[in-house]
Image: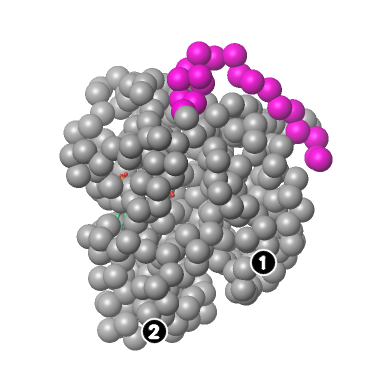
Amino acid sequence: MDLLVIEKPDDEILKKVETFCIEDLVKMSLKDDPSKFCIMPQKFVDQDRERIKNMEIFEDDVWVVTYPKCGTTWTQEMIWMLNNNLDYETASKIVLEQRYPFLEVSSILKGYPTDKVEICKNLTRPRHIKSHLPYFLLPDQLWTVKPKIIYVVRNPKDTALSWYYHHKHLHDYTGTKEELIAAFVKDLMFYSPMNDHVLDFWKIRNAPNILFLYYEDMKRNLDQEVKKAMKFLNKNYSQDEIDKLCIHLSFNSIRNNPNVNKDNAIVKYMEFFGKKYDQSNGFSFIRKGKVGSYKKELAAEQNLMLEKYADCSRLKDSEFEYKFG
Ligand code: PPS
């Protein structure tokens, strides 16, 4: 085990964002650099941390890494299609979670039925792997073998809102939006802190194996971002093929695609725990897909808290700016 310090933050707000499936949140930090920390369930520390740190990495791996709710699923489908010769037939038969597994999910969610780290280790190459882990918790070999990594960022206001609805509908979170946003800006949500998550990848964005994308750019001009990703993957498709892919990746198409939208899997997971997936008001895992929905959905106080969070001086020093649309 590398030198990690594990502690339980003494903060009431942390307990508020623990739910039936996300239990026992702890703060993991690096002993020799306490500024590097991440909030994770204790089970991750016990079960997956060491195995992931020491995982073998291959040059032809293709990773999608994000802070949660930044457009991971959308990007995974885009990258998988581009890297698999636009194989619509396989994509229509095999769910995305099987084509592009979520590395640490088994130790994040209570009672997850399979061992995803083992599954990822044994995937047919080229492996496609999703992770929400921050830079310092990802496998060591990622930084020496240097496979392709696609990082996606989204502005913290829309991200925190999406995180709130995710908790409310998928995790049976019963706290308020205000409490969840308070936890978010205090860096107490699991996978937090978001700013450091983003900045660590921003710093390496110009490395040849890194593609740094913005959710807001994908919304504004998907064609352009698809072409960027295509070039990054050394692929070449015609404009007609790209047009067809953009339709496949459009919000309605992704929302209505049972192999990408996770609603069916969520229903089963929640039923297993005697919970009901709350799909009232037409809620779906692929929810609204908008830039700027915070304008209508956030009260002035939460808007300001997130504004400050997004604008902290460290971000300015790095010349990184979120895009709010
Ligand atoms: S997760 O749980 O962290 O893996 O979620 P993630 O996939 O990162 O993010 C989910 C949000 O991405 C939106 N999404 C899209 N937006 C626009 N167009 C398309 N095609 C698309 N596909 C997914 C999804 O709706 C979630 O955002 P919100 O704001 O909640 O709608």
Q: Of the residues under marks 2 and 1, which one precedes in the sequence?
A: 1
Q: Taking 272 as reference, is 122 above or below it?
A: below
Query: Seen in the image, is 25 located left or right of residue 228?
Result: right
Q: Taking 105 as reference, is 161 above or below it?
A: above
Residue ID at (74%, 28%): 5
Q: State the separation of the CA atoms marked 2 and 1.
A: 30 Å
Specify the segment rendered in magenta: 1-19
Where's residue 70, x and y in %? 41, 48
Please name the amino acid that badge 2 sits on: Tyr
Q: Secondary structure at mark 1?
A: loop
Residue ID at (67%, 66%): 122
Which residue is the site of mark 1? 122
Q: Quadrant of the N terminus?
A: top right
Please name the amino acid that badge 1 sits on: Asn
Nearest the eye: 7 or 172:
172
Q: Quadrant of residue 57?
A: bottom right
Residue ID at (63%, 27%): 27
Residue 317 seen by the camera: no
Report the label total.
2
Q: Which label sits on residue 237?
A: 2
Residue 55 seen by the camera: yes
Where's residue 150, x and y in %? 52, 60
